[in-house]
Amino acid sequence: MKRMLKCLVWAVPLVALAGEPQSVWLADLDLSKMSSGWGHAMANHSVTTQELTIAGAKFAQGVGVHAESVMYLQLDGAATEFTAQVGVDDHAGKGKGSVEFEILGDAGALWQSGVMKGGDVAKAVCVPLAGVKSLVLVASDGGDGHNNDHADWVEAKINFGGAKPQAVAMPAEEARILTPPAPAAPRLNGPRVYGVRPGHPLLYRIPCTGERPLKFSAQQLPAGLELDEASGIISGNVTDRTYRTYEVTLRAQNQHGTAERVFKIVVGDTLALTPPMGWNHWYTHYNRISDALMRQAADVMVSSGMADAGYQYVNIDDCWMNAKALSKYQTDPKRVGPERDAHGNIVPNAYFPDMKALTTYIHGKGLKAGTYTSPGESTCAGFGGALGHEAQDAKQFADWGFDFLKYDWCSYSRVTGKKPDLAAMQKPYRLMGDLLRQQDRDIVFNLCQYGMGDVWKWGAEVGGHCWRTAGDLGFELNRVFEVALKNAEYREYSKPGSWNDPDYIQIGMIGTQTRRGTFEMAHPCPLTPSEQYAFMALWCLSAAPLFYSGDMGQLDPFTLNVLCNPEVIDVDQDELGQCGRVIPVAKKTFVMVKDMADGSKAVGLFNRGVVPARVTAVWSELGLGGAQRVRDLWRQQELGLFEKSFEAAVPRRGGVLIRVWPAK
Ligand code: GLA
C-alpha cells in the first residue's frame, strides 16, 4: 500500500529552505537511538520482526517498535514536514494492544493520535516542521499498561531542505545534588514512633546527623531499656508487659548544639508502625550473596550516613541456602548441597558459615537483620524452601536472631495448583504469620506474592506487615511512575503496621536480572537523575517500605543524596501512615498529596512524559483553603507563601516535592 502524504499547510515558503528538498525514511536513521519497551526498534518490520501490518494493510516501509518508545531527532530548522501513518501492528494479536502516538517539537506537542487500538486503521500524520530543531517521536501505552503495545510508524519520512535529520540520544541530564549537606549541629531523624511486643528485645539506633562525637541521652526511657550515650543505641526489654505508649524525649548533643525530639515507644501487638527502612541484597548481589557482603552492607549503612537518616534493616534475600543441584539460576557448586541436616534443620550454604554470628555482627551496630524463604519446596531461584518445616524454620530464624522475614510464594503454586482460591492463597501466610508471632522476638513479616488475590485487603489479617503489590520492579524499571500510580490505588489499606510494598529502590549501582535467568553485575542504573528523585519521592508519598537494593560497596554522593534527605524521609515515615492521593492533571502529569501528622501536606508534582511540563497543584483540589507556606523538600528551602496554587516546571520523567503548611 502506498499513499503519498503532503501537509496542507507549509509554514514557510520553499524558497526559504537552505538547499534542494530531499527526504529521508525514518527507518534509515539510526534506530539504536529509538527506545523500545520490549525488543528493539525494527527497520521495515514489526517489533516481532514480521511484516508491518495495520488493520490488514501491509507496508514495506516503516519502523516497528513497542511502547513505551521515544526517539529524539535533531533537525536544523530547515526540515519541512514529517509524514507517516501510525497504528497498532496486527501481530500484537487480534484486537490487542493500545498505543498513543505523539510528535513533539521544541515547544511541546505538534500532533497526537489519541488512543489507537489493535485493529484500528492506520492514521495519517502530516506535521509541518519549519523552524523545528528538536523533534521527538513517542509511542506510549494507551493508559492501560504496555502489554501487546506493538507500535508502527509506517511510511514515515522527513522532508528537509538543509542538513539531514539525525537520530540522537536522549539529552543527557546532569546528576545534580539538590540537598545541602547536613549541618554540623545534631539533627534527629527517622521515625517518631516505634512498636514492640511485650517482653521482646528492643534494638534501636537513634538516627542522627551532625558532627561526631555526639552525646545521646533520653528522658522517660521505660524501665528495662538502656541507651549507650556514645552510639545512641537503645537496647533491652521493657520490663512492664502491659500495652502502653511511652513518650521518650531523645536528645543529641555536640559542640555545635543540641537536638531534641519526642519518640514514642508503643508496647503492643503492632510492629512496623512506620514503613520499614533498610537494604536488601537482591537487585545487586542476586545468587552471589555471602556473609562478607552482608557485613559490608551493615558497615556501609553506618559509615555512609544511611543509618543516620533512618535505614535500619540489613536483609538477605534468596540464595543463602543450598540448592539440590546446579541450574540456570544456580551455577556455583559451593551453593549446592543438602538442604536440611539429619534433624530437618535448614542448612545455609558455604557462603554463610555462621548465621548467628552474622546477625550478632549486624545487631552490634544497632541495626537489624532480615532473611528470606519461600512457603514452597524451593525458593524462586531454586534453593531449599520451608514447605513442611515451617515451625522449625520460624524458630530457627528467631534463634539465629533475625528481625524480618520475606516469604516469597514462588514454588508454592505447585502445592495449590495454578488457580488457588483465596483460602489456599492465604494459608501459607497465615501459618507463618502465626508462627512468627509465637517467637520470643519481633519479626516483621513481608509477604511476597506479587499482589495475588488483592493481598492488600488481607495481608495484615494473616500477620503481614507489608506486602508486595506487584511483580518484580527490576523487570520494569522504566515504569516506576506507572507502578507507583497502580500501587496508590490501594491507598486505603496503608496504615501503621500495614504497608503496600511496590518493591525496592533501585538507583545508583544496580544489577539486572534478565528473563533468561542471568544476573548481571552492578552497573549504573538506567534511570535519569530526575527519574531517581521522582522514584524516591513517589515511594515516600506512598508510605512504601524503603529498601535500597543497590551495591553498598559502590555508593556515590548523588545516590546517597537521593536516599538520605531527612525531610524527604519524614514524608515516608510520617506517623499517620497515609499513602498519598493522586490527582490527575493532564495526560502525563499528576499531583500526589499526602496528609502529614502535623497537619501539613506533602505534595509531589510529577511529569511522566518525555518532555518537560508545567504542573500546578491547586490548593482547593488538595483540600486546602487560604495562603500556604511552601517548602522545597529536596533543596530544604522555603519558597514563600502561595495564595491559591503552586506551579512548577517539572523535568521530563521527573517530579518536584514540596511540603505545605497553612500560612498562619
Ligand atoms: C522473586 C521476588 C524477588 C526476589 C526473587 C528471588 O522474584 O519477587 O523480590 O526475592 O524472587 O529469587
Image (cartoon, grey):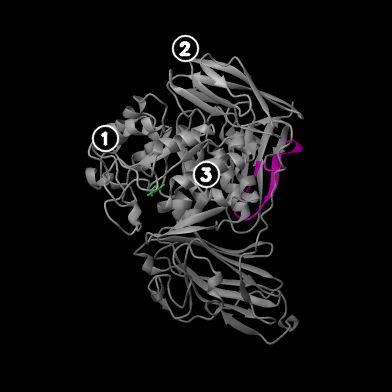
Answer few, some or many: residues within 10 Å of disc 3's Cα (few below 14, many 20 plus, some between 14 and 19).
many
Cα separation between marks 3 and 1: 38 Å
User: Callout 1: helix, strand or loop?
Assistant: helix
- From what the image shows, is residue 381 above or below residue 307? below
The region drawn magenta spans 634-657
Numbered disc 2: secondary structure: loop
Left or right of residue 649: residue 288:
left
Left or right, 401 with respect to 171, comes to left
The three-letter code of the residue at mark 1 reads Ala
Mark identifier at residue 127: none
Task: Report the mark closest to the observer, 2 or 1.
Answer: 2
Give SS at disc 3. Answer: helix
Please, what is the three-letter code of the amino acid marked with disc 2?
Asp
Identify which residue is drawn at 77% across, 30% down. 256
Which badge, 3 or 2, comes first in the chain's sequence? 2
Q: Residue at x 61, y 43 (%)?
A: 304
Give coordinates of residue 649: x percent, y percent: 69, 50
Q: CA distance from mark 3 to mark 2?
A: 35 Å
Which quarter shows the N terminus? bottom left
Give x and y (percent) for residue 512. 46, 57
Q: Are marks 3 and 1 in contact (CB under 8 Å)?
A: no
Q: Which residue is mark 2?
A: 240
Residue 567 seen from this side? yes
The residue that disc 3 covers is 297
Kindly identify which residue carries mark 1.
Answer: 423
Marks 2 and 1 sit apart, C-alpha to C-alpha, by: 38 Å
Say which residue appears at 60% left-offset and 26% top-offset: 597
Q: In the image, which is nearer the foreground, mark 3 or mark 1?
A: 3
Around disc 1, counting alpha carbons within 10 Å, would you say few (fewer than 14), some (14 to 19), or many (20 or more)?
Answer: few
